Every structure is written in C-alpha cells, then in structure tokens.
Image (cartoon, grey):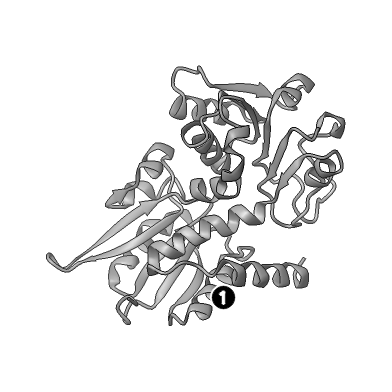
Amino acid sequence: MEPKTHRHLIALIGDPVSHSLSPVIHNAALESVGLRFKYEAIRVAPSDLAETVERLRTGKYLGANVTIPHKENVVQMLDRLTTAATRLNAVNTIRVIENTDSDTIILHGDNTDVFGFALPLSGYANQILGLSCLVWGAGGAARAVVYALLNQFHAGKVSLVSRSPERAERIQADLDPGGLRVSIIPWPAGRDAVREAALLVNATPLGTTPNTNTTPCPDPSLFTNEKIVYDLVYNPQKTRLLRDAQERGAITIGGLEMLIGQASQSFLAWTGTPMPVDVVRRTLSRHLKNHP
C-alpha cells in the first residue's frame, strides 16, 4: 500500500552531499515502481542538524538517509533505534512513523550499512566462520563491517588496520569490550596479518577516483585463490585492490554491491516495496560511466 500522499519527500542529510549517488539510486527506484515521491539531498551543517531533523516531523517526509558527518550526532535526536543502530551508535536511515492513536510523529533510526555489507558476502559465510578477517580503516564503515563480521558471520578474529589507533580502539571497546576477538594493527598491515586473513576488507577511501592507483595492500603477491577481497570503494567499480586480487585468483566483491544493498533496505523500510535492484544497478552503471 502506498503511504499517504502528503508525505512526498525523502531526504539525504549530510555535508557534503553533492557527490552522493543516493539521489540517483532512489529516484530511479521510485520511478521504476511508480511511487510519486522525491528523494532530495540536503547539505546540513552540524549546527543545523537538530532543526533539520525536527523538520522530518512536519508530515512532508517519509524518511531520510544520514551521511557524514551526522551519523553519530543524529542518534540522540531520534525516538527509537534498532539494535544495530544502538550497538554502533550510528544511524544512516530514519523512518518517519505516524502514530495515529496519539497524532504524533516517531523518528525511528536504523543502520542499514550492516545489511548492505553483509548481503553480497552471505554466500561465503562458511569461508569466514571462525577464521581471521582483516579490515583496513576505522571510520563509520569499518565499524559496521566489524559489527557484521562478529555478529552475523561469527569470524574468529578481526584485525583492524588504521592510521588512527584512537578510532580503532573505540571500535574495539564498543564492539568487543574484552578485546578477545578484535585486535589493532598499526598501518600498514604486516605480511603475516594479510596472509592469515581469509577475508580482507578495504573500508578506507584508498583507490577512489581520481586516485585510482592507490591501494591499502601494496604487496599483491599476498593474495591467493583462497581469499575473499571486498573493497567498499565503488568509484571506480574495479579498484586497483580488486584488480590485483582478481589477477591472483581471489574472490572479489566491489563496493557498488554494498551501496545498493544498504539502499535497498532503506527503500523497503520507507515504502514497504522491494527495491528494483536490477534497474538501480543499470542506472548506476550508466551514471558512473558518464560521470567518472
């Protein structure tokens, strides 16, 4: 059932937002399934965040996405949180719920980055269970990755490789308080850590256009056909990291799959309608080809 027609907007809240592919994704999906909503990106300075979130209660909005730098600060401004959002202390999706009994608006926060990361990896769960994984990065994306690896894939150990040990330590403290399953490795990762890992995840911007020759793993000889290499970078779709891994027979997963996965979960929460993923993937591929 289509939501009430007066709620016709979905927002992306962040700073900056001009680079975001979310409007391309969601407007293509909305048009494809015949829903008369508009997804718009709104640049919001930190000082304006609270006021912007309150505007979601006006009855015009179906929901919102939240991106850098507001994912953590928005948490305290919401009425309800999912378990993942609570554990991660970060929200990337807000659903606006009309409580008809009390004539109030409830803002419900979720973190669909976890779902988006896990979706393309689900077929390889047996290759991760109980084994070592390595994650480059310690930002919000890395936090979602570590949460998924510990709680959904039951990895035996996760090594965090970061130039910011303080941020890595916060992830460890929040998601593995005893430090039994999450370890912190100084940048760059040593050969033994890379060699030991069954799954390697790049949760840094390294390799992103225009710096496409950069990679978190400068020694591609460490890749083998027994490894899974997952790069969250989606522009370009095939990064240097993925090319190096693919040339040595590793299983590779690109960041476009996580981007579409997290968006599909948000879309379903807002509209009650599954996202037409094939339409979105074709639209994104055309867009990235025309806007490298």
Instruction: Name the quarter where the N terminus is drawn.
Output: bottom left
Residue on which disc 1 sits = 28
Instruction: Name the quarter where the C terminus is drawn.
Output: bottom right
Q: Nearer the viewer, residue 85 or 3?
A: 3
- Tell me if mark 1 has few (under 14), some (14-19) or many (20+) residues whose alpha carbon lies within 10 angstroms of its own: many
Q: What residue is rendered at 51% in x and 30% in y?
A: 154
Q: What residue is rendered at 62% in x and 40% in y?
A: 124
Amino acid type at mark 1? Ala
Tag count: 1
Residue 146: in sight, yes or no?
yes
Identify whether 188 is placed above or below 73. above
State the image coordinates of residue 57 (x, y, percent, origin top left). 29, 66
State the image coordinates of residue 52 (x, y, percent, origin top left). 38, 63
Identify whether 244 is placed above or below 235. above
Left or right for 138, reference 44: right
Identify whether 210 is placed above or below 148. below
Q: What residue is rendered at 84% in x and 42% in y?
A: 244
Quadrant in the picture for residue 142: top right
State the image coordinates of residue 140 (x, y, percent, origin top left). 54, 42
Quadrant in the picture for residue 193: top right
Left or right for 138, reference 3: right
Please identify the residue farthest to the left as the structure is shown.
Answer: 101
Q: Secondary structure at mark 1?
A: helix
Left or right for 16, reference 161: left
Q: Nearer the viewer, residue 146 or 57?
A: 146
Left or right for 27, reference 79: right
Residue 160: in sight, yes or no?
no
Q: What residue is rendered at 57% in x and 63% in y?
A: 17
Quadrant in the picture for residue 122: top right
State the image coordinates of residue 179 (x, y, percent, origin top left). 50, 18
